[in-house]
Every structure is written in structure tokens, then in C-alpha cells.
Image: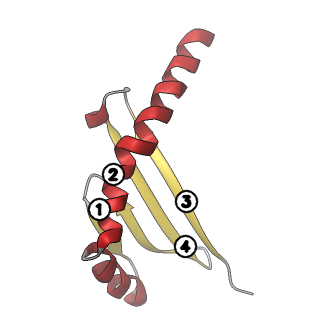
């Protein structure tokens, strides 16, 4: 069979927005084909099909939605994680 999955990640050094990186990686059969990184600001393809789709996604409304995820998804969750870690230490 075939396996397709998406991994969404927020990496951070502090709860400040400029210290957070949002990534969304698309995999097919354990091979990463496309990634969006808030540091790069667009989709990047890693296979022939991924490169074609990354170009299409980077020029469409999807890239605007992903850029907003850093603030809407990561910032609020990072704040919760930092607070939780500080109260337990």
C-alpha cells in the first residue's frame, strides 16, 4: 500500500514570535516531498512531483494561509508549553 502523511511542527527557543519556526512537511511512502517553512516563507519541493507542486502552492492562496500559522497556531501553543514547563521546574 501507499502511505501519505503530514507533520506539522513548531520549533522555538522562547515564546517570542521571531524565535519560532513553523514547518509543515508532506510525506509519501516515508519520503518527504514538500515542506513549508516559515523561515523560508514558501513551499519547497524535494522530488520531481514535489517541486512542481511546491511552485504551484507557493504562488497560490495556500502560502498565505501557512504564513499565518506561525502566529495563529504556534504562538498560542508555545505560550502554553513554556508556561507548563516553567511551573513544573
Where, by quadrant of the figure, is residue 42 drawn? bottom left
Q: Is residue 63 left or right of residue 87?
A: left
- What secondary structure is marked by label 1? helix
Please tell me the numbered disc located at residue 68. Answer: 2
Compared to residue 77, the image places residue 84 above or below, namely above
Q: Nearer the viewer, mark 4 or mark 1?
A: 1
Which residue sits at x=31%, y=55%?
67
Q: CA distance from mark 4 to mark 1?
A: 21 Å
Compared to residue 78, the image places residue 11 above or below, namely below
Within 10 angstroms of label 2, few (less than 14), some, or many (20 or more) residues? few
Residue 72 at x, y percent in the picture: 40, 43
Q: Is residue 8 left or right of residue 47?
A: right
Q: CA distance from mark 1 to mark 3?
A: 19 Å
Residue 85 at x, y percent in the picture: 56, 19
**Which quarter of the rendered picture does the N terminus lie within?**
bottom right
Instruction: Choose the circle earlier in sequence order: 4 or 1.
Output: 4
- What secondary structure is marked by label 3? strand
Q: Which residue is mark 3?
A: 7
Q: Which residue is mark 4?
A: 27
Where, by quadrant of the figure, is residue 50 drawn? bottom left
Instruction: Choose the circle earlier in sequence order: 1 or 3.
Output: 3
Within 10 angstroms of label 1, few (less than 14), some, or many (20 or more) residues? some
Asked if residue 30 shows in the view, the reply is yes
Where, by quadrant of the figure, is residue 21 drawn? top left
Residue 63 at x, y percent in the picture: 31, 66
Q: Which residue is mark 1?
A: 64
Instruction: Choose the circle earlier in sequence order: 3 or 4.
Output: 3
Proximity of marks 1 and 2: CB atoms separated by less than 8 Å: yes
Q: CA distance from mark 4 to mark 2?
A: 22 Å
Proximity of marks 3 and 4: CB atoms separated by less than 8 Å: yes
Q: Nearer the viewer, mark 3 or mark 2?
A: 2
Amino acid at each position: 500500500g501507499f502511505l501519505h502523511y503530514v507533520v506539522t511542527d513548531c520549533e522555538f527557543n522562547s515564546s517570542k514570535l521571531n524565535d519560532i519556526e513553523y514547518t509543515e512537511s508532506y510525506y509519501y511512502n516515508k519520503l518527504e516531498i514538500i515542506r513549508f517553512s516559515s523561515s523560508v516563507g514558501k513551499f519547497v519541493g524535494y522530488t520531481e512531483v514535489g517541486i512542481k507542486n511546491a511552485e504551484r502552492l507557493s504562488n497560490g492562496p495556500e502560502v498565505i494561509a501557512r504564513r499565518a500559522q506561525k502566529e495563529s497556531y504556534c504562538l498560542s501553543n508555545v505560550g502554553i508549553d513554556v508556561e507548563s514547563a516553567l511551573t513544573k521546574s
